Image (cartoon, grey):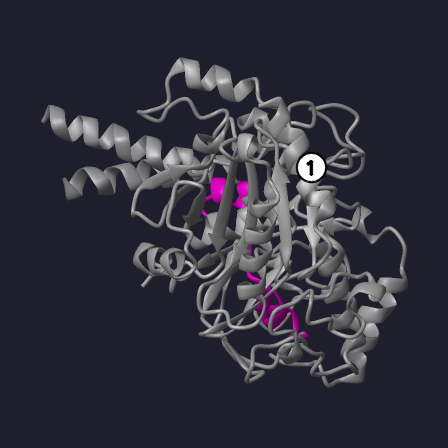
Amino acid sequence: MKNITYLMVFIFLTVMSSCKNSSENNTGNTETAQEKKRSESLPEMSIYHLPSHWTNQNGETVELKDLQGKVVVMVMIYTTCKAACPRLVADMRNIEKQIPEDKKENVLYVFVSIDPETDTPEKLKVFAKENQMDNEKWLFLRGTENDTREFAAVLAVNYKEISPMDFSHSNIISVFDQQGEMVHQQEGLGVDNVETVEAIIKMADKG
Amino acid sequence: MKYYSTALFVILSFFCELTAQNDKMVLVKGGIYQPLYGAADQSVEVDPFLMDVYPVTNADYLNFVAQYPQWKKSNVKTLFADKSYLANWTDDGSYPGLANAPVTNISWFAAKKYCECQGKRLPTMDEWEFAAMANEKLQDARTLETYNQYILNWYETPKTFRNPIGETFKNYWGIYDLHGLVWEWTLDFNSVLISGESRKDSDKDSNLFCGSASIGASDLMNYAAFMRYAFRGSMKARYSSQNLGFRCAKNVDN
């Protein structure tokens, strides 16, 4: 009986939290008072206010706020994309190369899938391996359709499924500081990334 | 256990009943239609769904922020709403104008959250466009000159957002105010791949958009719809506007 009560409370909280903000949501069983305080001290524009849960290429659960403390470079892609995405991956690699050795470990590169249905953790793992990005520097994330749409909205990335295997999407690489505030965006493919690299180095210095 | 879940559901539903005053929904049966900006094969199938009969009003929204204070004008995080959020509200508890006028100056995040808190969601762009192509008599009135003229006349009429809900026509599905009052947020407004900055995308720049060649206006004659898509394409999720409101939708339970 007691178990059932716990389960009910859990279900109740889960249902309620779906319409609440993470920062206000101190009812989840994992969020401690300390974490709540931390989230309150985040700048208002921090993406770490987004309450989303993701799965990485290793099948592990990742919350956005787990990324806090690093400079984060993000791009939205889908692994079956043949046109723009390989170039976006190349752009990310190119940016990473230009970061000085002593700052490399302060920076995390994140690929977020816009096709969570197709891009299972297994697919993301294969994609990471194919691109020699299968280490802790590169993070591949897949979320729910809802969280993905919300996340894209924050990044101002527009995307649309145009067939089961093909999406249209804007090609934007975003840089976030340690607190999750967006500090730079570069738009387009193969564009001059000097400013992006500068922004990353500047932020990584602060870390 | 099943009993408890059911009981819980009933309690929650009751809770929602109490908090939502303007929550009347009708069934839109769905079907196949041709959107202005379509998928690769142009036709899109819309599944049956429920849609609010009226847009969300000032009174509804006041009720919402009273219950979820994090969405009050003074509390909302700038990540979720910019300065224009509830711009006309004099403080957290009062709005200018009518209680039954549509609430406007709402960001996408706020609109989305409001619907989720009613156990609903925002309609998708295809759902909204599908429902909105009806006039009083026809499911799809888009080829009628009178239908288009009505919408264009409205676009030219200033400050219709101050009018009360329910005074435009009742459409084929029993829905009011899809045209004639305010523009409305959709769940996937950010699937419009025209940025509104013509220097960036006048040539469907393939640098900017993967697969952009397959996106194009299927019916450029439909100027009214084109305006809506262009507007959506120009919005960001934290923006709000005084002529932009919203209503909620819901899946049909099997």
Q: Determine whether A147 is above or below B48 in the image.
A: above
Q: Position of residue B178 (x, y in %)?
A: 68, 62
Amino acid on which the number 1 mark rests in the picture = Ala
Residue span colored magenta: B113-135
Q: Chain of mark 1?
A: A
Q: Secondary structure at mark 1?
A: helix
Q: Determine whether A150 is above or below B195 in the image.
A: above
- Quick check: is A202 in the magenta stretch? no
Give the residue number, with chain letter if any, for mark 1. A199
Q: Position of residue A110 (x, y in %)?
A: 49, 46
Looking at the rendered image, the quarter that the C terminus of chain B falls into is: bottom left
Regarding residue A181, the answer to whether it shows in the image is yes
Depth order, front residue of B191/B163: B191
Q: Position of residue A35 (x, y in %)?
A: 43, 19
Looking at the rendered image, the quarter that the N terminus of chain B falls into is: top left
Q: Residue furthest front?
A: A101
- Residue at 34%, 60% (x, y): give it: A126
> Around disc 1, counting alpha carbons within 10 Å, would you say few (fewer than 14), some (14 to 19), or many (20 or more)?
some
- Quick check: is B123 in the magenta stretch? yes
Q: Residue furthest left?
A: A1
* Quarter occupied by residue A190: bottom right
